[in-house]
Image: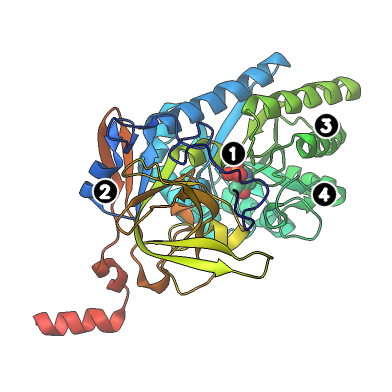
């Protein structure tokens, strides 16, 4: 019998050990002992080496997703007589190691702050292949980007035009820039994630963009590369892209009257499956819908098809990640306010909103499996929660797990490669977990876990106390 506390989309699983292919990274399976393994390394081995919580990246999955993003988007652009530039939106998950993967695979990289820029540069990618975003770049960030030779800075306000022109002028270089436009299209997604409606901070309204482009073009130290849009995140339907792209191309065509425009940047936001019930479209669906729109609109307007730029983040990183937790306390909570009393099993793990803020930020749903063993026990409706002092500290809001789940079980949560490590915090003085990349039977630490010493490293009184004790 399904538990009436379960949402409609959550089906009672036939086998609560099952690893749905749509949410687990491609090299995840169960070994003969029934243990979850990633690229040939068992969950038990991984936590024996690195403890819990632990972020695990299936490196070949990440690489394959990055490579296919590039090839699928390029193929769609080539079909309409153009080419594609694919930027990995690094805020999804960034370390210098990740930069080397993205670089090797021939993708470009997007950054959104001086820190992300520093990481991209330290990862060794050619600065020409970096795009800098942000609605409030400091002069220092702009200066650093210009002197590093970043290929594109995405202008997000009138004020930035002068700032970037001044930095480029001072260094006597010509800086490539895009203009982020808010087309007013509401991507079909969660409200908080939608970034192209009117009443929000990103971009320039469509109606004001032409004046700003004229201003950009009036500066000899700026080169206008094209318009930019990013209509939201975790998008499952191409309709928003189609409408927004039409509007952006309309403006692009008008602007051609006063000079060439080599590119158009259509952003990222391609959705992924977080739970088995999610039916995320293939990237090819978006790529073709967008390319067909571009081709038709350009033919209609009698203009040349520009180079298409894209910025997938989550699509590349999300499904390649898994978080491993240790199960601590378990509580059966009887809920009586929905008719017949029903039990929800609260399973607490040794992390939570500090390593995955998305459920608390966006009511994001995730999917879990016991990682250390298989179980034939009847599935129970669970809510996996963290150890923080917040009732909204949820890791997996709704799922069925074997009813015999117990303290010290290892729990794996799927699709945690994007916006988990990058949004992590030290809330409640928890140390941020390490990140391990697994490939062909080998686990390689790419970001070490924080220690208590790290937590106190910025605490002045603590540091002085230590110094005095030593002295
Ligand atoms: C965050 C962001 C992206 C990537 O979004 P995903 O949903 O991870 O694909 C792309 N472009 C811009 C400008 C962004 O801010």
Q: Pinpoint residue 59: horizontal percent, then vertical percent.
A: 38, 33
Q: Earlier in the sequence, mark 1 or mark 2?
A: 2
- Specify the quadrant of the image occupied by residue 338: bottom right
**Tag 1 near tag 4, CB within 8 Å:** no
| Residue identifier under label 2 | 47
Residue placed most toward the observer, 322 or 338:
338
Provide the secondary structure element on which disc 3 rests: helix
Judge depth for marks 2 and 4 and give the one in front.
Answer: 2
Residue placed most toward the observer, 304 or 243:
243
Residue placed most toward the observer, 2 or 321:
2
The correct choice, above or below, for 92 with respect to 162 in the image is above
Gap between marks 1 and 4, in whole Å? Answer: 24 Å
The correct choice, above or below, for 416 with respect to 280 in the image is below
The disc at residue 256 is 3
Q: Residue at x 90, y 22 (%)?
A: 300
Q: Earlier in the sequence, mark 1 or mark 3?
A: 3
| Residue identifier under label 1 | 272
Judge depth for marks 2 and 3 and give the one in front.
Answer: 2
């Amino acid at each position: 019998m399904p538990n009436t506390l379960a949402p409609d989309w959550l089906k009672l699983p036939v086998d609560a050990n099952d690893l749905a292919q749509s949410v687990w990274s491609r090299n995840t399976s169960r070994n003969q002992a029934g243990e979850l393994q990633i690229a040939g390394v068992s969950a038990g081995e991984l936590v024996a080496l690195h403890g819990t919580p632990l972020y695990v990246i299936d490196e070949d999955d990440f690489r394959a997703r990055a490579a296919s993003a590039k090839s699928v988007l390029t193929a769609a652009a080539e079909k309409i007589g153009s080419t594609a530039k694919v930027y990995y939106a690094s805020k999804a998950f960034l370390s210098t190691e990740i930069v080397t993967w993205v670089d090797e695979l021939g993708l470009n990289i997007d950054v959104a702050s001086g820190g992300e820029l520093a990481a991209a540069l330290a990862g060794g990618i050619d600065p020409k292949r970096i795009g800098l975003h942000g609605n409030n770049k400091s002069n220092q960030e702009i200066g650093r980007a210009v002197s590093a030779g970043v290929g594109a800075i995405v202008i997000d306000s009138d004020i930035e035009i002068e700032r970037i022109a001044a930095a480029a002028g001072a260094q006597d270089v010509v800086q490539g820039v895009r203009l982020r436009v808010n087309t007013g299209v509401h991507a079909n997604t969660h409200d908080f994630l939608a970034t192209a409606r009117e009443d929000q901070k990103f971009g320039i309204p469509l109606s004001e963009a032409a004046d700003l482009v004229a201003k950009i073009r009036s500066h000899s130290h700026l080169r206008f590369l094209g318009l930019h849009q990013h209509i939201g995140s975790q998008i499952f339907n191409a309709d928003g892209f189609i409408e927004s792209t039409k509007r952006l191309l309309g403006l692009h065509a008008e602007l051609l009257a006063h000079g060439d425009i080599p590119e158009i940047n259509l952003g990222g936001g391609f959705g992924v499956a977080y739970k088995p019930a999610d039916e995320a479209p293939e990237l090819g669906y978006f790529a073709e819908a967008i390319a067909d729109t571009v081709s038709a609109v350009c033919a209609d307007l009698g203009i040349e098809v520009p180079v298409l730029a894209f910025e997938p983040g989550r699509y590349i990183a999300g499904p390649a990640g898994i978080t491993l937790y240790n199960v601590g306390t378990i509580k059966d909570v009887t809920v009586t306010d929905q008719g017949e009393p029903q039990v929800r099993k609260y399973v607490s793990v040794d992390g939570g909103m500090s390593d995955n803020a998305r459920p608390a930020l966006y009511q994001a749903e995730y999917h879990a499996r016991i990682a250390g063993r298989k179980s034939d026990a009847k599935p129970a409706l669970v809510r996996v929660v963290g150890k923080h002092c917040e009732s909204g500290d949820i890791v997996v809001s709704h799922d069925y797990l074997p009813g015999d789940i117990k303290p010290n079980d290892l729990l794996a949560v799927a699709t945690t490669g994007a916006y988990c490590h990058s949004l992590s915090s030290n809330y409640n003085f928890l140390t941020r977990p390490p990140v391990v990349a697994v490939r062909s039977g080998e686990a390689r630490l790419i970001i070490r876990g924080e220690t208590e010493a790290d937590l106190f490293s910025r605490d002045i009184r603590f540091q002085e106390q230590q110094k005095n004790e030593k002295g």
